Amino acid sequence: MQTSILEDVLEDQSYVVKKHTRAEEALKEHKNNPFELVLLCDTNEESISFVDRIHDGQNRDQCIIISLLENGNTSCLRPPVFQKIDDCFEIESSPEIIRSRLKFIKERANIRSEFMETNVIHTNELERINEELTSTIDEYRSVQSALGESEAKVRAILDTTVDGIITIDIRGRIETFNRAAERIFGYETDEALGEDVSMLMPDSNIKPHNHYIDSYLATGIAKIIGIGREVVGRRKDGSEFPMELSVSELQISGRRLFTGIVRDITERRNLEQALLRVSELERQRIGQDLHDGLGQAITGIGLISQSLANKLRPENPKCADEIDELTRMVKEADQLARDIARNLVPVEVESNGLAFALKRLAANSERLFDIECSFDDPVDTLVKNNSIATHLYRIAQEAVSNAVKHGKATEIEIRIESNTDDMILTVSDNGTGIDEERPLKSSGMGLGIMQYRSRMIRGYFSLSQNQSGGVDVCCRVPKEFF
């Protein structure tokens, strides 16, 4: 039987709430420190015996005995029980009704105590009590009717919305789970209610989620509350999928709850990946045209101009020198075209692969930025998927640029590691670091682009402070997606 709401009401009215599962322990404590109020969660033989022994005790008149009903079930109130208790009410009632009911029961008990002491009670007092009882019953029925109507409206709204709506308590237990959430995660409502919300997350997301909630409850500083973000969800069958999550806080009857609105964005991600593949193919075509078409044409022009200069040199040295200058400019244009082509298609999987491209990135970074930049690939990792290789290269390129421009790094290491399940790209620097809690708030960091590229290849992106005070940018890609 759920008694948390009742406990909250009792504690709010300065009662000291104690729970007993054994009658002997409760009677022993009652003898030393008489109870003011006894709430029976069950009416079995032990409970009846417990009530009888309180009746026989010297503190009987100081103790109010109430039987708690669940779902309006009065079948437990057999004559032996009904004659021994002072009152009963439903445990599922709202806090307002419970307070009103307790007030009435206590007041009636006080009047009964006065009656036992004086054997006198006025008729108008009985009428007043009866009127209050009638009023309380009418109020109860009115509130129950209003609550029923309100709950029906809320349920209709929740069940017709296209977004999944999930409510959890401060312990992470699921309290509401609408039909859209059933469709998204594959769980029936009855399977989800009362379970930990971690059942809807990949194992890698559970610890950060718990940290965010605990930190917010302890400090009041919101890191995910009220902030929409993209995360990974886990369905009943164990499959993972991308989703948008927005979390908000609400308080109901003094209880703190968190509501998450979830949207499955799998189709959007698939469409973005398809568009990205088309874009990469077009970039590759343009790069190939620049390299094989324009590049070769410019090279031919350079060879012709150089030959012309050699022919003119004996008769007209000045004109030959001018043609030499033209030849030099043609070579620069040829190099520029090839550099543009290489940037458009940085990773040539069929010939050199990702490792070669990252090694070249490290060398170019040393030359352009005047820093120490190394590349390490201890297992000679080969990524055959050109799209994945290109995304990883762009992530590394962006990470190096950020480390130099924003982190003021002087040493950078690009590293590829591989294990049975994953391929891991890491870019580490010795720069000034960033705010780990709100990295995307840092201006000009381009971290959103890296996260986006990581999502496009179904990778897991992370950013952390390293021992040197700089930043480790990491992208882990499951090999099953290669």
Image (cartoon, helix red, strand yellow):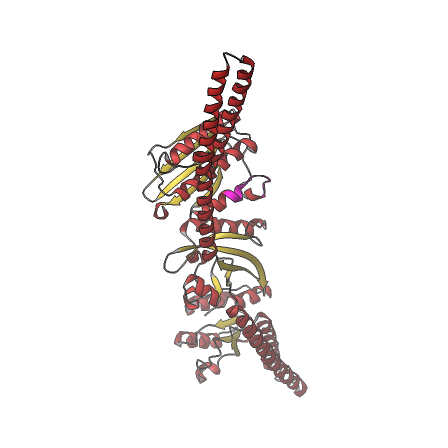
Q: Is residue 135 left or right of residue 196?
A: right
> Camera-side residue: 430 or 352?
352
Residue 65 position (above or below residue 464): below
Residue 189 forms part of the magenta stretch: no
Residue 417 is at least partly visible in this image = yes
Hey, which quadrant is residue 322 in on the image? top right
Which quadrant does the N terminus fall into? Answer: bottom left
- Identify the residue shown where x is 51% and y is 56%: 245
Residue 446 forms part of the magenta stretch: yes
> Camera-side residue: 122 or 99?
99
> Camera-side residue: 311 or 76?
311
Residue 409 position (above or below residue 9): above
**Which residue is at the far right?**
124
**Which residue is at the far top?**
314
Position in image of residue 461 (x %, y %): 46, 44
Position in image of residue 379 (x %, y %): 33, 34
Residue 467 is at least partly visible in this image = no
